[in-house]
Amino acid sequence: MIGKLFGEICDIYLDHIIINVNGVGYVVFCSKKITSKHHVGDKIELITQTMVKENDISIFGFPNDIDKEFFNHLLTIQGVGAKLAQTIIGSLDIDEIIQSVQINDDRKFTQISGVGPKLAARLVNELKTKKFINKLQNIKVKHEISTSSNRHSQIIMDATSALMNLGYSLGQINSAINDVISQGKEIELEMLIKNCIKILST
C-alpha cells in the first residue's frame, strides 16, 4: 500500500499526472485542484489511495487528508465511482459541500459533469448526516492547525538563521523569540526579526 508519494511531475493530463519518484514514473489520478495549479517539473507531495480491481491497480492522489476522507465517503454512495468522486472533489471545496448539504441544496452538484438531478439529490441526502459533516469539519480544523504550525516553524527557523548571521547566540535568539511569541503578536518573519532585535538590543 502506497500512503504518500514525493517526487517531480514529468507529465500532466486532464485527470492524472505522472510523478517521477527516484526514476519510477507513477500514474496518479487526481482532481483538477492538482492538475490545474501544477506544471511539469514541479516537486509535489500527495497523499494517496490505492484502488485494486481484478485487472487493474490505480493510484489516486490528494493534496490533504480532507479530500481523501471525502473521496472514500463518496465511494460508498450508489452511482459514484472513483473517477466521478475525483471530479466532485475537484469541482467543489469542502466548505461549499458542507454548506450545500446543510441547507439541502443540490444545485452545486448538478453543475458537475456526470452528476444528474437524481444523483445530486442522493449526494445531498447521503452527505448531510451530522456524523459525517462533523468528521469533515474536524479533519479540516486539524489540517489548518497543522498547516499553521508548519508555517510558524519555518518562520522561526528563518528568523533564527537571520539573527545568527547578525552575531547573536542561539540562546539569546531563542529567549527573544519566546518573548515575542508570548506577547501574542502575529508571527510574520520581518516583524519577528525586528521585535527580536529590539529585545536583544536592550
Image: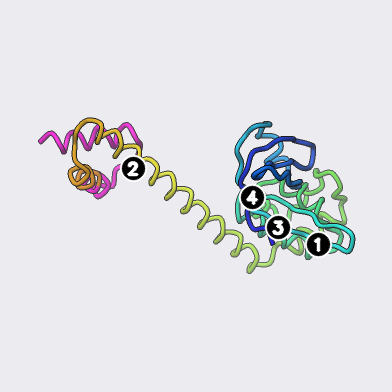
Camera-nearest residue between 156 and 92: 156
- Image quadrant holding the N terminus, namely bottom right
Q: Is residue 119 above or below residue 158?
A: below
Looking at the rendering, the stretch of residues picked out in magenta corresponds to 178-202
Residue 54 screen position, x and y as percent: 88, 64
| Residue hosting label 1 | 52
Q: Secondary structure at mark 4?
A: strand
Say whether marks 3 and 1 touch (CB < 8 Å). no
As measured in the structure, the alpha-carbon distance from the residue carrying label 1 to the one carrying label 4 is 17 Å
Q: Which mark is residue 156?
A: 2
| Residue hosting label 4 | 5
Residue 196 in which image quadrant: top left
Report the colour scheme. rainbow
Q: Is residue 59 magenta?
A: no
| Residue hosting label 3 | 49
Under mark 3, the amino acid is Gln
As measured in the structure, the alpha-carbon distance from the residue carrying label 2 to the one carrying label 1 is 43 Å
Under mark 1, the amino acid is Val
Left or right, 35 with respect to 158, comes to right
Instruction: Please report whichever mark, 3 or 4, sits nearer to the chain's N-terminal start.
Output: 4
* Residue at the image position 22 percent from the left and 42 percent from the top: 173
Our reading of the magenta stretch's main secondary structure is: helix
As measured in the structure, the alpha-carbon distance from the residue carrying label 4 to the one carrying label 2 is 27 Å
Instruction: Please report whichever mark, 3 or 2, sits nearer to the chain's N-terminal start.
Output: 3
